[in-house]
Image (cartoon, grey):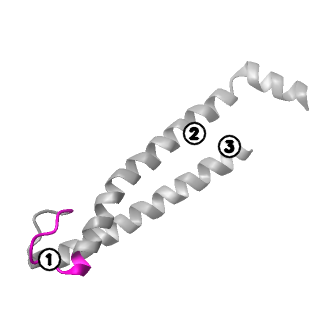
Amino acid sequence: MAATWIKTAVTAAGAAVTLYAAILGKKVDELAAEGARGATEPGAETSADLAKAQKQLKLLQWVIPGVAATVIVLGAWHGEMQRPKNVKLGLLKD
């Protein structure tokens, strides 16, 4: 049961991080006219507000795949726990 709660929490965290990235992306898009070099790279005349959003977005570009990979690993771990030999051991243990 603990594995289910952990996987649920990581999945919810991933959804929250993805939502926050979308909000930052919209903010970067709205302020892009300030002269950014790219979506996550500030230009020389970029405001502090835009530069901060870009820095956060750059970090989230790594966090989101990391959270997704964690969910995949937890799913595999959860699947292994459902193998007949593990279920049998679990039933005999209780």
Disc 2 to disc 1, how far (Cα)? Answer: 40 Å
Q: Nearer the viewer, mark 2 or mark 1?
A: 1
What residue sits right under mark 1 in the picture? 46
Sequence order check: which comes first, mark 2 or mark 3?
A: 3
Q: Is residue 44 above or below residue 76?
A: below
Q: Is residue 27 above or below residue 21?
A: below
What residue sits right under mark 2 in the picture? 74
Could you tell me the amino acid type at mark 2? Leu
The disc at residue 86 is none
What residue sits right under mark 3 in the picture? 3
Q: Residue furthest top?
A: 85
**Magenta span contains residue 25:** no
| Residue 36, horizontal then vertical, whole percent | 12, 70
Residue sitting at x 14%, y 76%: 46
22 left or right of 6 in image:
left
Q: Nearer the viewer, mark 3 or mark 1?
A: 1
**Magenta segment, principal secondary structure?**
loop
| Secondary element at tag 2 | helix
Residue sitting at x 68%, y 43%: 3
Marks 2 and 3 in Cβ contact (< 8 Å): yes
Nearer to me, 74 or 79 = 74
Read off the magenta span.
Answer: 40-50
Q: Residues within 10 Å of mark 2 (few under 14, many from 20)?
A: some
Could you tell me the amino acid type at mark 3? Ala
